[in-house]
Structures are given as structure tokens and as C-alpha cells.
Amino acid sequence: MEESRRSFRAVLWIIGILGILAFGCSNEKPDSRAKADSPQGFTFFDLGANSKYSRSVRRRLGGKLGSDSISQKNTIDLSIHDNGFLEKWFPGLADLNRRLNWPAGQRVEHNTTKLMYRQARMKNTPFIYVELFFSDDTLKPLLFRIIAGPDGNAILETIRKKYGPPKEFRWAQKEGRTQYWEDGDNVFIVSSYKTKWDTPEYLFCIYYVDNLKEMLTEQEALREAEDERIRRAGESAF
């Protein structure tokens, strides 16, 4: 009888230890808003327009791109190549860029998370630099900017097969070409050109315009509410 009681207590002790271990392993919980839905639209490493940023997403990207740098409350500049490029070829993006950086001449920071990868080549990828912006309010992606070396041509072929024939134009000032795809308001731009060392380089930019507009609409509503609060406070002072 005593031996049976000792065996029973041993079983309870093992169950208790397993419960403690299980609790400890589940201490870090993912963001409840981050759902693993199938990515939609233009994608980069299975992140699409409807994806949500989370710690698990950051860990997964780290496994593919290496160590990252992270920053919050960032400015967002949509412009590429030179100041007149978007105005000439993508006026809708140029207008959106002005809204993102209004008032002009001021440093306008947005409630965002930016991930930067500068050592992706050590992970056997063709990427020289990767920059990913996510909204901290919706967790959705806003802007992906990726630079690749000569191997970028193979990536471009893969993109063509996935999204079909692009629209394109050649640069007038120097040797270069831009190809792009549109999915509603969202735009995927790929530019190929030569660096000052005469080596081929590729710039891949995914503009999640719907998500950028959603963020701006919320910010502008908050700004208007704050301006109204200040106006009323001024009226009540006199």
C-alpha cells in the first residue's frame, strides 16, 4: 500500500514539472492581431498586403536574411533614384509621398517599425540591402525596398513569371530601365541600372498604397481632432 502511494506521488510530481515547463515555454505570446492568413498581392518572403508584423515574423526573416536593425517612429520617403522620378512616372506615389511628409520641410515621423538587413549575402541571398516598413497600428506592411546585385536579373525573371508581363520604360539620362506591375493601387517597381563601378544593380520596391492610405487617413483624423481641441482651448481662454 505504501509503495502504491509513493508511486502515485511520483506521478503527480512528474505531471507538476511538465506543467511548469509547458507554462515557461508559452510565456512569449504572439501578437493576437497577427493572423497567419495566406499572403495577398505582391509578396516578399511570404509577406503580402494582408500580412501582419509579429515577433515570429521578425524571427523568420532573421533566419532568411541574417541579423537586423530595428527602429520605431520613422520618417517614410517613397522617392527613388532622384527627386523627379516619381513625379514624372508615378504621380500618384509622388502625391502620397507629399502627404506622408506634410508639413513640408519638417521631420514627420510615423508610428511604424522599420527592419533593416545589411548582411543578407551571408545567408546566401543576392540581396545587398533590405528595408521593410510596417504600421504599428495595423501591423500591415507599408513599403519594402530591396537592393540586389547582378543576380537580381534571375529574381526579375521569377517576378515576370509570377505576375506576368510588366509595363516598362527606359531612362533618358543614363543607362537604366524600370519595369512595374500594378495590383489595384499597390505598385511593384523594379529598376535595373549600372553603379558607378559599372556593375549591374537592381532596386525592388513594393508600395502597399492601400495600407499607406489607411495609415494616413487615421493620422489625419487624429491631427484634425487635436487641432480642434487646441482651437477650442484657445476660444475658452478668452
Image: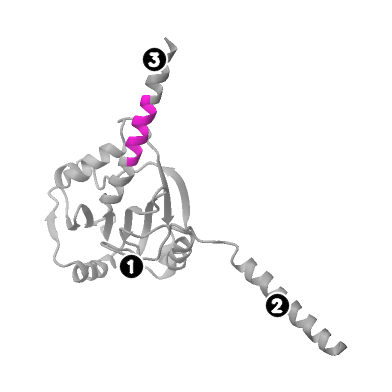
Question: Which residue was labeled with disc 2?
Answer: 15
Residue 14, x across and y down, in percent: 73, 79
Q: Is residue 77 above or below residue 140?
A: above
| Residue at 47% from the left image edge and 51% from the top image edge | 70
- Residue farthest to the front? 1
Q: Is residue 171 above or below residue 26?
A: above
Q: Which mark is residue 235?
A: 3
Q: CA distance from mark 3 to mark 1?
A: 51 Å
Q: Are marks 2 and 1 in contact (CB under 8 Å)?
A: no
Q: Specify the principal SS of the magenta part.
A: helix
SS of the residue under disc 3: helix
Q: Which mark is residue 183?
A: none
Quadrant, the N terminus: bottom right
Q: Nearer the viewer, mark 3 or mark 1?
A: 3
Question: Which residue was labeled with disc 1?
Answer: 38
Q: Earlier in the sequence, mark 2 or mark 1?
A: 2
